[in-house]
Image (tube, coloured by chain):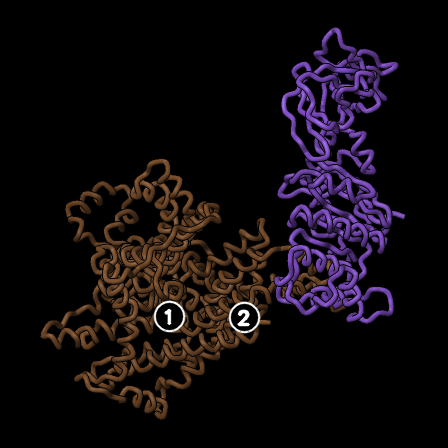
Chain colours: A brown, B purple
């Protein structure tokens, strides 16, 4: 009997995962799309055409949809208007800022890959593993960090003021959006390119040199072809991510620099759900197409990974001679820039949370948080519930996302058609923005769905956990699948030949052997949940289920202590502390779980 | 009674056949070896018996019971894997005891005692608390064997169990495996690519090639009477000579491109039906260097001589064909030699229809 149950467990797990995804992701998102293309059950192109032919959204490209036969005239107009003044529309602007952000990320990330791959220095490994961190930092917190650093009363202007310069105005400009996007995505470029660079077999370079190639020629002929695909992969991913970016643009750009994503949010806020759904559909079509390109491209280059000896690393510091080495001086310069971009905002967040506008130390902002907590006024955003909610949602996300992620990882590593399906299942949530998932959940779960004559509704908190699980499980799979795939399948075969069912082999042999990867996946899922803003901000609307990031965003707009960021930086610091603490906690727990 | 029986078993991977209509009948208590080059389907055959691969066609029976649809954990087979697959997060003792969580072997012995006995059996007593990684390759091999035997399987399956070890240890351990198998009397299927190993320890051998079984028989038959050209070439050193059929009753073959002044008509046991040209094989040790009185003598030139210690390996050339000869003389042979052949030592390994 129990063996029968064990044998059914995995297939049931697969079905349950698919069912959960259908409920928390595919059905809600599908309902959003349906709204855009269906009118009382009949297919319609009306809303789509309305958006596409509106110059506000598509800029000069709207001619394509308004009057396709008049394209020559449209092009003529486009040329006569002059390129810089070309009206981009929301879609054009979104693509434009994504392109700029991609360029900035590559420019900032590539030298880092060079340093990490080719130089040896104290803390190199730590630095390499730290490149994963920005990815899981709550984006609204990073946005507040950037405000704290580059804002009118931020750290940078404070410092400039001391030497009689400034102030410079960066907030609500494209520059700061691009810079914040680089903060997120340059480490991605660094990590992917470093890995590719380290997998270049030194014997290939040495063969090229032995056959008469100069160092530069060997780089061009051997190293460059090896790292270019990963650079393109990273660039493509960066473009997708920044195309869909939300909290950064919302907090740093405002509606003036609204991307499609921010505009969808604005439409939802003004309860124009129809137009929001249509915009969401168009955005998703674009991001899915980009994601498809990415997957096609990534699949083609996977086979190039080889086991060889990587290139030898040079020492970064060579005593006093370091100062006479132009390359090393340039690296030092890069290090300073990187420190400003990556450490600056987080440091500014901490400093600004205890600094009054005149530069003196203050605890006023934390007192404000305590006052908020004590306040009995309706609609007050209290810090403690936000913290508790975040932790509860994080735990709920773990309960859902870890088993789901493991099940998808098992299917993905089994090979064959199931594995490709799993890859598609896995990647879809990455290509659908949190706003759209949130909107879908709002419409289907929170407002309710009629099924067999019953109206089924789920409370906001449940919907939030669902949304977080949909966003987080791919990270569990991303961690577990490579570890599971890399594990010798004979361990599993050995266990089964000794009498263990598939489930027992998984629980007793495979998962303990890849415990580190499972824990890393869990830590990611937790961090994603704690930092999730896009869908939470929609689902927590009017509910007391707000989280730390949502509270943070509300404090950014709170001017009760004058025009400064104080309360937001204080809340941001709390968020930073709890994010870090939960990481440490999981790490410690993990240490004990290991056999 | 049969231990394991395969009837017309075929397995395909993504439409590519891995084994095609393989039929084997392995007696209870027999030591049966599957041998062949990599990719011949021997491991797939073994994994099909273990239940890790599902046949597209055919029947697999263990102890007379059809095991179609029976998952690996319910087949009561013990498997030793190529790299042992000892669980690195468990001690040696825990590894050996793992199968006892799920199976209760016959006998009145407690689990703990059984593990201790098995560790003694494989000469690893006192090593129970070690981690597998602390052990040498040979020791890990013994533990893997003990682990596979612990639940008292009906059939023992060994997949290239010695291939990760160095030559000397391989020869020592294959004797250990054979002795253990004899002691326990357990039906055993052994997979190896090493033909010498296969001949040394098996009751019977199946030579596989391209997903099919080429020949099944005791090691002596496989060696002395290879059924196909592939078996003749794969098992041991061999000389293959092309010949033309000169008479079918009694069956006689003339070595092709023969000198007119040399007697090269060879009487053979039997001929493949309706063949005009045939391939003959003769072992290097059956070619007697310097034997002028043999029924068939060939005059050949010596090209290369290798000294192997107990014998010389002499590469000769006769009529544009190279012939490998084992020579047990005291010193290297001269440049021109006479090679003596007894027709009894010649096997017909394949025919070509006219």
Q: Quadrant of residue B213?
A: top right
In the picture of the structure, the residue carrying the numbered disc 1 is A137
Give the residue at the far left of this rendering.
A164
Give the residue at the far right of this rendering.
B1
Alpha carbon separation for disc pair 1 and 2: 21 Å
Chain of the residue that carries numbered disc 1 in the rendered image: A
Disc 1 crowd, CA 10 A, few/some/many (<14, 14-19, 20+):
many
Q: Nearer the viewer, residue A184 or B99?
A: B99
Q: Is residue A540 visible?
A: yes
- What element does badge 1 sit on? loop
Q: Residue at x 44, y 74 (%)?
A: A583
In the picture of the structure, the residue carrying the numbered disc 2 is A400
Residue B350, horizontal then vertical, whole percent = 75, 23
Relative to A246, say whether A460 is above or below: below
- What element does badge 2 sit on? helix
Q: Nearer the viewer, residue B145 or B271?
A: B145
Relative to A520, say whether B80 is above or below: above
Horizontal placement of A558 versus A397: left or right? left
Q: Of the numbered discs in the image, which one, if any, rests on residue B18?
A: none
Q: Nearer the viewer, mark 1 or mark 2?
A: 1
Quadrant placement of the C terminus of chain B:
top right
Relative to B91, say whether A98 is above or below: above
Residue A537, horizontal then vertical, whole percent = 38, 73
């Amino acid at each position: 009997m129990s063996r029968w149950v064990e044998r059914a467990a995995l297939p049931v797990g697969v079905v349950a995962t698919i069912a959960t995804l259908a409920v928390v992701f595919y059905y809600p998102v599908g309902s959003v799309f349906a709204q855009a293309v269906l009118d009382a059950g009949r297919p319609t192109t009306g809303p789509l055409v309305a958006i596409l032919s509106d110059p506000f959204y598509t800029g000069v490209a709207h001619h394509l949809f308004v009057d396709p036969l008049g394209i020559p005239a449209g092009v003529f107009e486009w040329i006569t208007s002059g390129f810089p003044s070309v009206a981009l529309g929301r879609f054009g602007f979104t693509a434009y800022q994504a392109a700029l952000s991609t360029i900035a990320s590559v420019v900032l990330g590539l030298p880092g890959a060079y340093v990490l791959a080719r130089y040896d220095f104290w803390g190199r490994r730590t630095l390499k593993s730290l490149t994963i961190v920005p990815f899981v930092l709550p984006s609204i917190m990073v946005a507040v960090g950037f405000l704290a650093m580059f804002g009118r009363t931020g750290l940078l202007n404070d410092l400039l003021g001391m030497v009689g310069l400034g102030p410079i105005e960066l907030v609500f400009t494209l520059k700061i959006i691009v810079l914040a996007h680089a903060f997120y995505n340059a480490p991605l470029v660094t990590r992917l390119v470093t890995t590719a660079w380290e997998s270049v077999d030194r014997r290939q370079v040495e063969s090229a040199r032995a056959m008469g190639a100069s160092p530069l020629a060997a780089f061009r002929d051997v190293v460059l072809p090896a790292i270019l695909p990963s650079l393109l992969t990273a660039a493509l991913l960066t473009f997708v991510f920044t195309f869909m970016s939300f909290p950064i643009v919302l907090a740093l750009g405002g509606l003036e620099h609204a991307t499609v994503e921010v505009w969808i949010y604005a439409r939802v806020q003004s309860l124009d759900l129809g137009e929001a759904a249509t915009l969401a559909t168009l955005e998703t079509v674009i991001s899915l197409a980009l994601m498809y390109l990415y997957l096609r491209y990534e699949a083609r280059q996977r086979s190039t990974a080889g086991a060889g000896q990587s290139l030898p690393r040079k020492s970064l510091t060579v005593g006093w001679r370091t100062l006479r080495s132009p390359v090393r001086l340039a690296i030092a310069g890069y290090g300073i820039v990187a420190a400003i971009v990556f450490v600056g905002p987080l440091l500014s967040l901490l400093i600004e949370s205890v600094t009054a506008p005149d530069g003196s130390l203050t605890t006023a902002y934390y007192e404000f948080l305590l006052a908020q907590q004590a306040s009995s006024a309706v609609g007050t955003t209290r810090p403690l519930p936000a913290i508790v909610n975040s932790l509860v949602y994080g735990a709920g996300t773990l309960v859902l996302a870890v088993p789901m992620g493991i099940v998808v990882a098992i299917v993905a590593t089994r090979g064959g058609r199931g594995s490709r399906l799993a890859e598609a299942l896995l990647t879809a949530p990455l290509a659908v923005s949190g706003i759209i998932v949130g909107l879908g959940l709002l419409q289907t779960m929170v407002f309710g769905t009629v099924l067999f004559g019953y109206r089924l509704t789920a409370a906001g908190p449940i919907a939030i956990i669902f949304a977080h699980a949909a966003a987080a499980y791919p990270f569990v799979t991303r961690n577990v699948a490579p570890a599971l795939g890399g594990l010798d399948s004979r361990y599993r075969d050995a266990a089964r030949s000794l009498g263990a069912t598939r489930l027992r082999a998984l629980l007793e042999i495979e998962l303990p052997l890849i415990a580190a990867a499972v824990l890393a996946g869990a830590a990611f899922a937790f961090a994603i949940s704690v930092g999730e803003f896009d869908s939470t901000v929609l689902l927590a609307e009017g509910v007391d289920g707000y989280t730390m990031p949502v509270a943070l965003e509300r404090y950014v707009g709170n001017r009760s202590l004058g025009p400064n960021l104080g309360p937001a930086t204080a809340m941001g610091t709390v968020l930073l502390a709890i994010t870090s603490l939960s990481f440490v906690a999981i790490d410690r727990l993990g240490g004990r779980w290991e056999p | 009674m049969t231990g394991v029986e395969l009837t017309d078993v075929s397995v395909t991977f993504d439409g590519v056949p891995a084994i095609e209509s393989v039929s084997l009948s392995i007696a209870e208590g027999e030591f049966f070896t599957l041998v062949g080059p990599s990719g011949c389907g021997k491991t797939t055959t073994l994994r099909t018996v273990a239940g890790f691969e599902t046949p597209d066609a055919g029947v697999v029976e263990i102890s007379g019971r059809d095991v179609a649809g029976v998952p690996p954990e319910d087949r009561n087979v013990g498997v030793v894997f190529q790299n042992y697959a000892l669980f690195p997060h468990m001690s040696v003792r825990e590894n050996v005891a793992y199968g006892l969580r799920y199976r209760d072997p016959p006998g009145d012995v407690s689990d703990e005692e059984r593990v201790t006995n098995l560790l003694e059996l494989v000469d690893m007593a006192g090593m129970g608390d070690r981690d597998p990684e602390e052990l040498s390759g040979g020791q890990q091999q013994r533990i893997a064997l003990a682990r596979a035997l612990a639940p008292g399987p009906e059939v023992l399956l060994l997949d290239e169990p010695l291939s990760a070890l160095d030559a000397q240890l391989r020869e020592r351990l294959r004797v250990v495996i054979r002795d253990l198998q004899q002691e326990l009397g357990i039906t055993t299927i052994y997979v190896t690519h090493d033909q010498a190993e296969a001949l040394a320890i098996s009751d019977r051998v199946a030579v596989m090639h391209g997903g099919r079984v080429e020949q099944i028989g005791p090691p002596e038959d496989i060696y002395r009477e290879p059924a196909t050209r592939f078996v003749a070439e794969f098992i041991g050193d061999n000389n293959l000579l092309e010949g033309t059929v000169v008479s079918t009753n009694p069956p006689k073959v003339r070595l092709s491109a023969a000198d007119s002044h040399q007697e090269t008509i060879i009487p053979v046991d039997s001929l493949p039906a309706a063949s005009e040209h045939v391939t003959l094989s003769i072992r290097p040790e059956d070619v007697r260097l310097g034997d002028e009185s043999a029924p068939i003598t060939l005059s050949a030139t010596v090209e290369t001589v290798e000294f192997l210690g107990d014998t010389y390996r002499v590469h000769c050339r006769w009529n544009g064909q190279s012939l490998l000869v084992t020579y047990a003389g005291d010193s290297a042979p001269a440049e021109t030699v006479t090679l003596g052949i007894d027709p009894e030592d010649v096997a017909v390994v394949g025919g070509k229809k006219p």
